[in-house]
Image (spheres, rainbow, N blue to C red):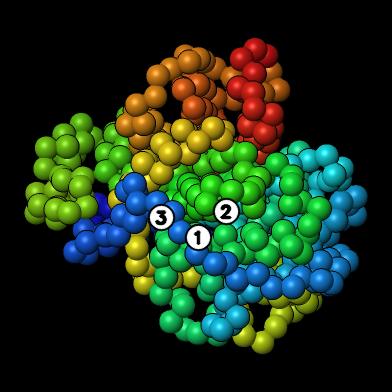
Amino acid sequence: MRVLFLFFSLLCLVAYTECYGGRGYDPLGELLKTRKSRKSFDNHLAEDDVSNEYSPVYVAPQDGLKESDKILRLPGQPSVNFSQYSGYVTVDPKAGRALFYYFAEAEDYSSKPLVLWLNGGPGCSSIGNGALTELGPFRVNPDGKTLWYNKHAWNNVANVLFLESPAGVGFSYSNRTSDYVTGDKQTAADSYTFLVNWLERFPEYKTRDFYITGESYAGHYVPQLAHLILQNNKITNQTVINLKGIAIGNAYIDYADRWAGTYDHFWTSALISDETHNGIIANCNFSSEAPDSDACQNYQDDYVFAYLNTPEVQKALHANITGVPGPWEDCNYDILGDWEDQPDTVLPVIKKLMASGISVWIYSGDADGIIPVTTTRYSMAKLGAPVKTPWYPWYSQGEVGGYAVEYQNVTFVTIRGAGHFVPSYQPEKALAFFSSFLQGKLPPGTN
């Protein structure tokens, strides 16, 4: 415990990664530190157990709700030429469970694909983090009251939908408190129900090319949701959701790789000594089933918060309603503490997605210490895909943007100088990478 605290403190100090909520707190790290004390894990989505039976999905009438969700203007926002929407989609009427979304259309929305963005945690907000800190059209000024325009926002090239999931995250809620004890399976099911109903509310997007993107613990969310979409499309013999691809960044996809890659990253970045690194490798067990030995243990920001808790902002977002559990928070740490099912690895799910024919991209900010590039490279090797285009430097605005390698049915891209929140650290490079992903082309290899 002592060495992990030291590591995460070092990461915050040297800016290897953002510190959630300005607290120097890493939700994913905290989740993983508790795993070895648990007896078993549910690998329901890691194994080949796809049911051939369709589970009915709740679908409600959505007439008129799109118009009521339209945002006339956010407090303190600059003038823009695109439409915004936000509001709630009920996913379980009996429990009173509803998920909150924010949707930023592109200026030429009719010609652009639809992209869902999911932050991880688990339990962290896609609006406070993804929309207002990373890839959304606005960022919050230091006064906590006004916004500035992000010229590298992803809605330059896509219609971007941000979802706060599961219930209890951000403005999403349930009237049944037991719903706040949740996990991967329920999160995937609720996100799917959300999408089906949201597409009823926005029917013009029903046949639009659809992509799912996200980061960190969304390395679980994104593949699992994509798997569920393809499974239901197959069972119903219809394209309920027109999924074309996924992209996950600095993704937690394999438990063992996470720790081994992290320690190797600390060592190669000169954050720990040769002696400490050798001691960790010799004494630590990176599987979740076995506890660490005593020898191993011996080795071992406020602007958005203020803005989203302003009554005028919540009213403009259609979020200030009875039933929201307290003020908006960037991460719900109670959900983190009560997270139930989480397979050790989602690599089998990713392999299925690779075989399905959709586009699968995995990207990594090369200065991240939470899920380092070394961790992701170890996971890529486990996928066992042959190389089609060898490792090469790609360019953005006349300089190296990172490196890329194309494997059979999966592409791996690094973003140079980016931490855990890639679009926050390197907005220009992130947009260039994202544009290539949507175009189905490798990032440019010349300047």
- Residue on which the image places disc 2: 236
Q: Is residue 79 above or below residue 262?
A: below
Between 232 and 262, which is closer to the camera in this rendering?
Answer: 232
Q: Are marks 2 and 1 in contact (CB under 8 Å)?
A: yes
* Residue at (54% x, 67% y) in the render: 56
Q: Residue at x 72, y 59 (%)?
A: 199
Residue 127 point in image, percent of width and height: 64, 60
Contact between labelled residues 2 and 3, with CB atoms less than 8 Å apart: no
* Left-right relation of 82 to 299: right
User: How far from the left and from the top, in percent, is residue 179?
Assistant: 46, 77
On the image, which quarter does residue 128 sit in?
bottom right
Q: Write down the quadrant of residue 277 in the picture.
A: top left
Q: Position of residue 259 (x, y in %)?
A: 28, 44
Q: Which residue is mark 3?
A: 51
Can residue 170 be seen by looking at this rendering?
no
Provide the residue designation for mark 1.
Answer: 54
